[in-house]
Amino acid sequence: MTISLKSALAQAHSNIALIKYWGKRDEALKLPQNGSISLTLDALWTRTRVTYSESNGPDQLWLNGQLASEPMRLKVQRLLDLLREKEASSSGTPLGAAKIESENNFPTGAGLASSASGFAALALAATAAAGLELSRPALSRLARQGSGSACRSLYGGFAEWQRGESADGSDSFAISIDETPDWDLCMAVLVLNDLPKALSSGDGMAQTVATSPLYPAWLASIDEDLTHMRQAIASRDFSALGELMEHNALKMHATALASRPAVIYWMPLTLELLARIRDLRQSGLECYATIDAGPNLKVLMQERDWPRFQAALAHWHELKALIPCRPGPGAFLVPDALAGQMP
Ligand code: 2P0
């Protein structure tokens, strides 16, 4: 008896939101309350191999060489089941149980957007292994249902996740703003804590939507932020982009802080570093911070300023890592000849 395996390996890079997604209008479909704009990073990525067998049974998820927790496995299985529905309706041949092997080249679940790169790589690998060809908007919609921010990692450079209006999510996916920006940007990832966070971003945003009296003000301000961010990108206005990015991140955290109970992702060091970024800016090194659902900062600067920035933080021994990133590529399939080069 011959056993035929269908397999594909994909790589996707994490993305950092310049205008943040914070809050869902539909939990199951992962439809956002607001649109968002991101920058995909070159240095942080996930590689995922999906292999379908011919037998039925539960999908098996290996994350960084270890069997994943049951809640994580179920999230992944849910996404594969969406694909199985598509496959059954197009060819009638059911896909068997899948083995998913996923590796991150950076800490998982610590606010470094591992779910964004993870679910983008999964959507692409699972689709290719199934022999399906989906457009990027369709892949983006699929990745969204694994983790909202993943829909932006299908694209390189600057991408926008359109909120959409429909109840079924058909118009809620990411589009490219500028895939390969000729812009000397550097986003430095400052890792203060590389442990998984206590409160997931999904729970944090749900608590904010349900209880923060500031949430309506957050939503009312987003269309203007999106418009100004698109303009700053189009005109390569670094100061406008950086100032708005930092404002939008602090506004998101202010909204979350006003929840009951409070949603707090920061550590004391987060604030100390924020103050340091302001000092550096005043001393002429133009850099701006953003913070996601975790204590770590990401700092945007122009590439020529990276050596001075690195030197300015050299004595911060509390920093676990300082990773310089440039704009990175969209998700892609890794040819089998290169598959041995896992992180
Ligand atoms: C973002 N974050 O736009 C925002 C900013 C964190 C802060 O998207 O619940 O892992 O799976 O849709 O995408 C992180 O949330 O959440 C996130 P789910 P996700 O990048």
Image: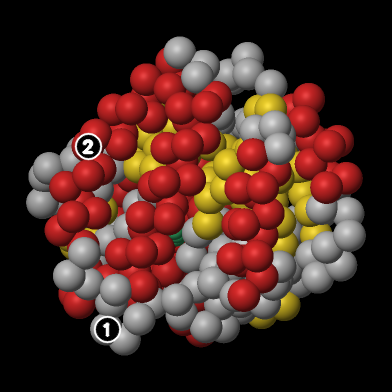
User: Image quarter for residue 339?
Assistant: top right
Above-or-below relation of 184 to 31: above
Q: Mark on residue 276?
A: none
Answer with left or right where residue 135 lies relative to residue 113: left
Q: Position of residue 220 (x, y in %)?
A: 16, 47
Above-or-below relation of 275 to 174: below
Q: Residue at x 24, y 34 (%)?
A: 224
User: Image quarter for residue 267?
Assistant: bottom right
User: Image quarter for residue 260?
Assistant: bottom left
Q: What amino acid type should be assigned to the residue bearing mark 1?
A: Arg
- Nearest the camera: 198 or 88? 198
Report which residue position mark 2 lands on: 223
Q: Position of residue 274 (x, y in %)?
A: 60, 57
Above-or-below relation of 329 to 11: above
Report which residue position mark 1 lands on: 260
Helix, strand or loop for disc 2 = helix
Helix, strand or loop for disc 1 = loop
Q: Position of residue 242 (x, y in %)?
A: 52, 35
- Nearest the camera: 236 or 144? 236
Q: Is the CB of mark 2 within 8 Å of ligand 1?
A: no
Q: What amino acid type should be assigned to the residue bearing mark 2?
A: Asp
Q: Is residue 314 visible?
A: yes
Q: Residue at x 59, y 20 (%)?
A: 180
Which of the four quarters of the rendered structure image does ligand 1 lie in? bottom left
